[in-house]
Image: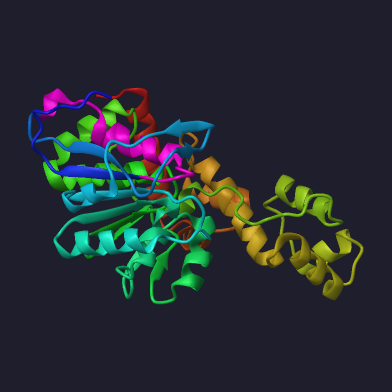
Amino acid sequence: MTKSSYLTGPLVAALVYDGLCTFEFGIVAEIFGLSRPEMGSGWYRFESVAIEQGPFRAHGGLTVSADSEIERLNAAEIIVVPGWRGIDSPVPENLCERLRDAHARGARLVSLCSGAFVLAATGLLDRGVAATHWRYADALRNRFPSIDVDEASLYRSHDAIFTAAGSAAGIDLLIEIIRQDFGAPAANSVARRLVMPAHRTGGQAQFLERPVAQREGSEISPLLDAMRADIALDWTIGKMAHRCRMSERTFLRRFAEATGTTPGEWLTAERVAIAKDLLCGAGARIDDVASAVGFGSAHTLRHHFRRKIGISPTEYRTRFLAEARELAHPQ
């Protein structure tokens, strides 16, 4: 990547460490480090900054080197933590001190995915809100109980600290930072080059497929398959237990062991998941979708959809169809 010495915009420093998350780092380099002469001389300057002595191994069998040493963080206006090498891996105190100093002088701090654990270690997120990947949310919440962990949103901000959820949600956050710095036209331009929508509202829950675990080969697996195949049926506890040839008490215990949840919650999650697919079909009416998945009424569908996904069925369909058109015909 060729450096552009004519640039005068904010200096973005992406941390480099042993065990580097390649995808997350690539997002930062693509968005802030790619040459964009159409943006003018005020566009971002980009450098990779080593937080420790190399060599640095990156996911995928790569070995990387950085542009600068950790002292360069003293000049950075935006510091990005592109993931972290492990949620149980200690964060060096030297790095925490550098990040606290940067924040005190007005620099913005950004984390992608598991990088939230690095910012949490500084104490700067205490009594604030943070996003991280849904699979890490409980660990972050348990380790840092003073942080309000938001596992539903794509990204959150608090006191000039920005945290993104899963890896790809980092793209959404970085484009939002561009929007704040340079306006919507610049953000739209970068998004088009990435061949993605300029903005996704809503949260991670919209993109989680079958979030409830199922132990394959369990004795209730045939029942789960049958329920999916006839999702609109009135599946009472008695009916489920009878199909498994168990007492209701035994059935409820075995169901929890196999799925980690109750039959009602599992069935609701499955109905919402199937409703998501049906809503994206052409001309699907909300009442028809509700009936097809066993919710009975549009009101019941809306209630459970909002509870599970965070937005209404109509909002979900409108936004996803609009994004599909934009991806198919980028301007």
Q: Is residue 301 above or below residue 121?
A: above
Q: Residue at x 51, y 37 (%)?
A: 59
Magenta stretch prevailing secondary structure:
helix
In percent of width and height, residue 323 lies at 36, 35
Q: Quadrant of the C terminus?
A: top left
Q: Is residue 246 above or below residue 292?
A: below
**What is the span of residues highlighted in magenta in the rendered image?**
16-39
Q: In terms of depth relative to the viewer, which is nearer, 232 or 113?
A: 113
Residue 209 as seen in the image, left or right of residue 207: right
Q: Is residue 226 above or below residue 63?
A: below
User: How many badges with numbers are in the image?
Assistant: 0
Q: In terms of depth relative to the viewer, which is nearer, 40 or 204?
A: 40
In percent of width and height, residue 240 lies at 81, 62
Residue 40 as seen in the image, left or right of residue 169: left
Q: Residue at x 31, y 71 (%)?
A: 128
Q: Residue at x 33, y 70 (%)?
A: 123
Place residue 178 in its image quadrant.
top left
Color theme of the render = rainbow
Q: Is residue 319 above or below residue 118?
A: above
Q: Residue at x 29, y 68 (%)?
A: 124
In percent of width and height, residue 265 lies at 63, 64
Residue 214 as seen in the image, left or right of residue 72: right
Place residue 324 in its image quadrant.
top left
In percent of width and height, residue 1 lies at 28, 24
Furthest toward the front, the residue is: 53
Residue 66 highlighted magenta (yes or no) = no
Residue 5 as seen in the image, left or right of residue 118: left
